[in-house]
Amino acid sequence: MRGIRLGSAFGIPIRLDVTFLLVLPLFAWLIGSDVSNLTGVINGLFGTTIDAGPLTVGSMRWVLGTAAAVGLFVGVLLHEFGHSLVAMRYGYQIESITLWLFGGVARFTEIPEDWKQEFTIAIAGPIVSVLIGVVSYVGFVAVPLGDPIRFVLGYLALMNVALAIFNMLPGFPMDGGRVLRALLARNRPYARATQIAAEVGKVFAIVLGIFGLFANLFLVALAFFIYMGASSEAQQTVMKAAFEDVTVRDIMTPREELHVVDERTSIAELMNRMFRERHTGYPVMRNGNLVGMVTLDDARGVREVERDAYRVDDVMSRELTTISPDDDAMEAIGRMQERGVGRLPVVDEAGEFVGLVSRSDLVTAFNIIQSRGSLDSFAREPSLDVRT
């Protein structure tokens, strides 16, 4: 989620995802279309007598809708800064804050595993939202302003408190779900706490989705996001626990056991080897040195009638993403995901090609580690050679 960079504050880049450019006008339209009803809600809650009539004349409703929507997303941005500034105080780096379809996301370079730190970071956002609501309410009742401004302040007071309450529901990875994980992690392994919080989050997402079918389809989309987010983070956490103290050296295929291909090999011969050996990617060698990687997708780019004429060095990738044998296995996973590749050449400190680690190596290693015992034992067991 990169988006359009707006600037930065406190050293944190602020971005807008393209979906935000759609949802902001939508919110402005929804608020503007419902000014009359919202005025009644504000009057009922706060005991005021704002006249809705003048607020719905001409373009006034759309001006109010736009102002309220912008104010709401400014509140969301400050909510994310609440998380981020507390995290920075603990020494964590923040890659960015992005406003998008479902509000805001603060992207951390590392998720805190200390339960006290996670609890404090998670609770900081809702606290900021409540404070914004309180400040808006004080302005609403204490400052002599016209009804249009009072409407916007009343709306922001109401919605920021509602935002804080909603975020504290146990829909992991929402704030409430992270608070739940932090509390669970007080007396159980972090991976197990994540699993429980994720399961609770999935149940919450299902209930929210069913409710959304009868109330608002936006809630259905939000429920899907929560469900997928819970599944993804749980999987990442379980993998991180499984691969603790496991290095690339433990799971890579060493050079002497690798199937490699010479750069002068024809594409036709390469395809035959792929069929016989059931491999879809090979390191490409020249005089014993690694010069590239070639995959099935590279070979497919050559028309069948030309495969005898083309050689591997015509289609191979020369810009290689490598990894050290002493790097963590999770670093290999992250690098593969970042670069969109299925295998990484392993190069030692001297620049020598010493092996290859693939996505299938990682999956096999993960399955073997899982078979050794429950998640509760991952953090305590010594690493093993899980290479296949």
Image: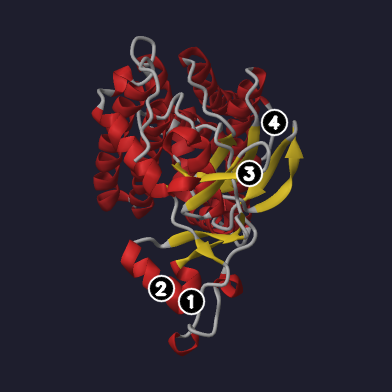
Q: Amino acid at mark 2?
A: Met
Q: Amino acid at mark 4?
A: Pro
Please rate how many residues cluster around mark 2, counting C-alpha atoms within 10 Å: few if below 14, some from 14 to 19, many from 20: some
Element under disc 2: helix
Distance Cα–Cα, label 2 vs label 1: 6 Å
Distance Cα–Cα, label 1 vs label 4: 79 Å
Please rate how many residues cluster around mark 4, counting C-alpha atoms within 10 Å: few if below 14, some from 14 to 19, many from 20: few
Residue plotted at (49% across, 34% down): 249
Q: Which mark is residue 144?
A: 4
Task: Confirm or deny contact between disc 1 and disc 3 (CB under 8 A).
Answer: no
Identify residue for label 2.
271
Decide if residue 54 is in sight here: no
Residue plotted at (37% across, 73% down): 272
Quadrant assignment, res 162: top left
Q: Which of labels 1 and 4 is toward the front?
A: 1
Task: Confirm or deny contact between disc 4 and disc 3 (CB under 8 A).
Answer: no
